Image (cartoon, rainbow, N blue to C red):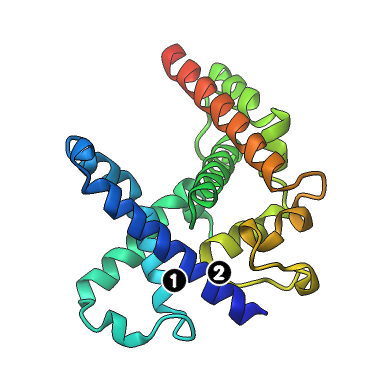
């Protein structure tokens, strides 16, 4: 089952990347295509990096033209998704969830890092963001395995393979990691949290 999930995950991300580049080449996107490409680079990098590590899903010959420099760029660019988290050590909805998870976790790490004391107003702003119900659900410790599957394709040990359905969004994994939500409800929760977080970050920025 893990092999099937890997193959399906790579295929779905490849399909998304193909559709993205198709849309970027459309006439009405010409003026902003470079901005979108810049924003999407970390995600495209992790798709390429992880796909190269899954020879059972993608023939290594596909990457014969991949230079050593390109490999290094992809390996490094994908780390920008981790933001502050990195110092501590495929599909549109999936990319959005991964982004939100990383932003919220990074803000949490920033708030708790005693090396970088924040002003009372900044601490209050971060508490406003992190104390939201939606933020708590998204950053729950059990969600990390779900995030790792989205980013690296592999099913982790906590997944119940008997409940995996390759025809369902995110392979039917949502109820396993978010017992109170189905895929639609989780998507709505993510949208709410994105709006709340963006609003609070803008409010914080104007108050600094």
| Residue for point 38% across, 86% down | 59
* Numbered disc 1: secondary structure: helix
Which quadrant of the figure contains the N terminus? bottom right
Image spot of residue 162 (x, y percent): 80, 73
Would residue 25 be found to the left or right of residue 2 on screen? left
> Where 54 sits versus 206, above or below?
below
Query: Can you tell which mark lies on residue 165?
Result: none
Name the one closer to the observer, 135 or 195.
Answer: 195
Query: Can you tell which mark lies on residue 50?
Result: 1
Image spot of residue 179 (x, y percent): 82, 50
> Where 109 sits versus 159, above or below?
above
The residue that disc 2 covers is 153
Q: Are marks 1 and 2 in contact (CB under 8 Å)?
A: yes
| Residue for point 42% across, 13% down | 206
| Residue for point 55% across, 32% down | 194
Which quadrant of the figure contains the C terminus? top left
């Amino acid at each position: 089952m893990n092999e099937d999930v890997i193959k399906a995950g790579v295929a779905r991300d490849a399909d998304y990347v193909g559709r993205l580049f198709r849309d970027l080449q459309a006439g009405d996107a010409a003026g902003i295509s470079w901005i979108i490409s810049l924003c999407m680079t970390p995600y495209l990098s992790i798709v390429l990096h992880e796909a190269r590590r899954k020879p059972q899903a993608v023939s290594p010959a596909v990457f014969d033209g991949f230079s050593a420099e390109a490999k290094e760029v992809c390996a490094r660019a994908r780390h920008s998704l981790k933001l502050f988290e990195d110092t501590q050590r495929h599909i549109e909805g999936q990319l959005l969830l991964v982004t939100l998870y990383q932003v919220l976790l990074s803000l949490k790490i920033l708030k708790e890092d005693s090396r970088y004391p924040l002003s009372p107003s900044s601490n209050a702003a971060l508490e406003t963001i992190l104390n939201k119900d939606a933020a708590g659900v998204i950053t729950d410790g059990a969600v990390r395995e779900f995030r790792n599957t989205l980013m690296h394709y592999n099913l982790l040990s906590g997944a119940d393979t008997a409940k995996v359905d390759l025809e369902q969004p995110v392979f039917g994994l949502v109820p396993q990691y978010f017992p109170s939500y189905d895929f639609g409800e989780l998507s709505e929760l993510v949208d709410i949290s994105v709006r709340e977080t963006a609003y609070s970050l803008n409010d914080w920025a104007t108050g600094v």
